[in-house]
Image (cartoon, rainbow, N blue to C red):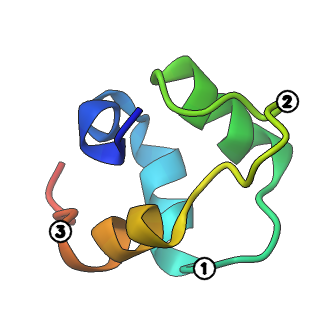
Amino acid sequence: MEIYMWWLDLDLQTKEWLRENLRAPELPLPVLQGIAEAGGPHPDTPVAVLTEADWDFIETQSEFVD
C-alpha cells in the first residue's frame, strides 16, 4: 500500500520519529507497530517496511503540521 494512503492515520509521535531519523536503516518496534496500525506494511513482511519512495515522501511531501 502506498504511504499516502496510511500516512494521515499514523500517530504524531511516529511521524516525528520518521522525520527526525530519515532513511534510518532500522526502525524501532514502536515505529513499526505504529506503521502497521495505520495500515502500512506489517513488520513481519520479508521486504523492507519503508521503500526509497516512502522515505522521499516523508522527506518532501509530509507536512509538519498534522
Q: Is residue 12 above or below residue 17?
A: above
Q: Which residue is mark 3?
A: 61
Would you say 37 lies left or right of 45 here?
left
| Location of residue 12 by image quarter | top left
Q: Which residue is mark 2?
A: 44
| Location of residue 22 by image quarter | bottom right
Disc 2 or 3, which lies upstream in sequence?
2
Q: Nearer the viewer, residue 24 or 16?
A: 24
Where does residue 18 sit, x and y in percent of width and height? 53, 64
User: Callout 2, which amino acid?
Assistant: Asp
| Residue occupying the point 50% across, 48% down | 13
Helix, strand or loop at label 1? It is loop
Q: Nearer the viewer, residue 37 or 1?
A: 1
User: Callout 3, which amino acid?
Assistant: Gln
Where does residue 51 sit, x and y in percent of width and height? 55, 62
Are the residues tagged 3 and 1 within 8 Å (C-beta)?
Answer: no
Q: Split into 4 quadrants, where in the image is the N terminus?
A: top left
Q: Which residue is mark 1?
A: 23
| Location of residue 8 by image quarter | top left
